[in-house]
Image (cartoon, rainbow, N blue to C red):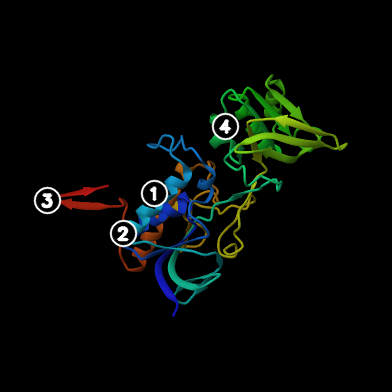
Amino acid sequence: MVQEYEVIVVGGGPAGLSAGIFIARQKTSCLLISKDLGGQMNLIPKLENYPGMMMSSGPLLAKTLESQFLAFNGEMIYDTVTMIEEAEEGMKVKTNRSEYITKAIVLAPGKVPNSLGVENESTLSNKGVHYCTKCDAPFYQGRVTATVGVGGYLLESGILLSRMASKVYLIYKGGTLGGDKEMIASIEKKENVQLVPQSSVKSISGTNNLQSVTVVDNSGKETTLQVDGLFIEMGSKINLDFVKHLVKINSKGEIEISEGGKTSHPAIFAAGDATSIPYKQIVAACAGGANAGLSAFNYIERLKGRPGIRADWKKTIGDTVFHY
């Protein structure tokens, strides 16, 4: 027998977990399907820029959000969504192991950073190897860093690191930098930035933490750079093959959303890094998840002939009703 839920959330990162919290709080049956818990939050060993939490970590925040979701009787399974289709009863969600029927869906699959694919990369992740300069550059004040990437990702990474690190190696395959001319001019004026053109990272090494990066240029010459941190800014990928036939996708491969996390499909809402929001930050993902979750709940309410809500919660204490 196919299990039915009023809302299914796809993705267990900050956007998906936040959406689940705001749906489950309304005593709405909600299933969250994810390959893992936390998504890209697991790449963050120290979390400084999430309001109200100093020096926490991404995994700890993920666990906290999961506990909140489950406390409101939300359900969560670890699986991979392979296809979403329309059905007479609403929407059919197929996974590797099962099928589900739902009236509304919140998409929050997030994105996955592209890796270099070199030995020790995964071992040294969060131990000197990072995939988000915006997130982790502040931990390298006065230290030696390197960044490797493409286009605007690399330029932005180099500029951010130059404001904090004592030295920055900017590694790129081309003979010249590509991207915004003003950003390139700014990079070239930085005294603490050393350009490493026509080169790629061959290997990285370190015991408990990253210690060095070996680069090879187009002639085959190898150079070892002693660094404290390596920032990989090769862009990211978003897998939307399972739903791209139902929602509008922009030229960047992101889900187009409007106010409240609405997509081009009336029963599908979306939030987080897989959407067209400009700022890919945890706090923005959580806010988007809350919006999409409330929109999904209101969609369910309208199907029942009810008006929906604007405030997410109310509680009666004595003779007073408090709205939160």
- The label nearer to you, 4 versus 2, is 4
- In three-dimensional space, the C-alpha distance between marks 2 and 3, rounded to whole angstroms, equals 21 Å
User: What secondary structure is marked by label 2?
Assistant: loop
Q: Residue 109's x, y, as percent?
A: 53, 56
Residue at numbered disc 4? 137
Numbered tag placed on residue 318 in the rendering = 3
Mark 1 vs 3: CB contact within 8 A: no
SS at circle 1:
helix
Report the side of 203 relative to 230 (left or right): right
Q: Mark 2 = which residue?
A: 26
Q: Tell me which amino acid carries mark 1.
A: Thr
Q: Is 62 rendered above or below residue 159?
A: below
Left or right, 89 with reference to 225: left
70 or 245: nearer the eye? 70
Residue under label 1: 64
Which amino acid type is shown beneath numbered disc 4?
Answer: Ala
Q: For this rendering, which residue is in front, 296 or 76?
A: 76
Residue drawn at x 70%, y 39% as measured from the top left = 204
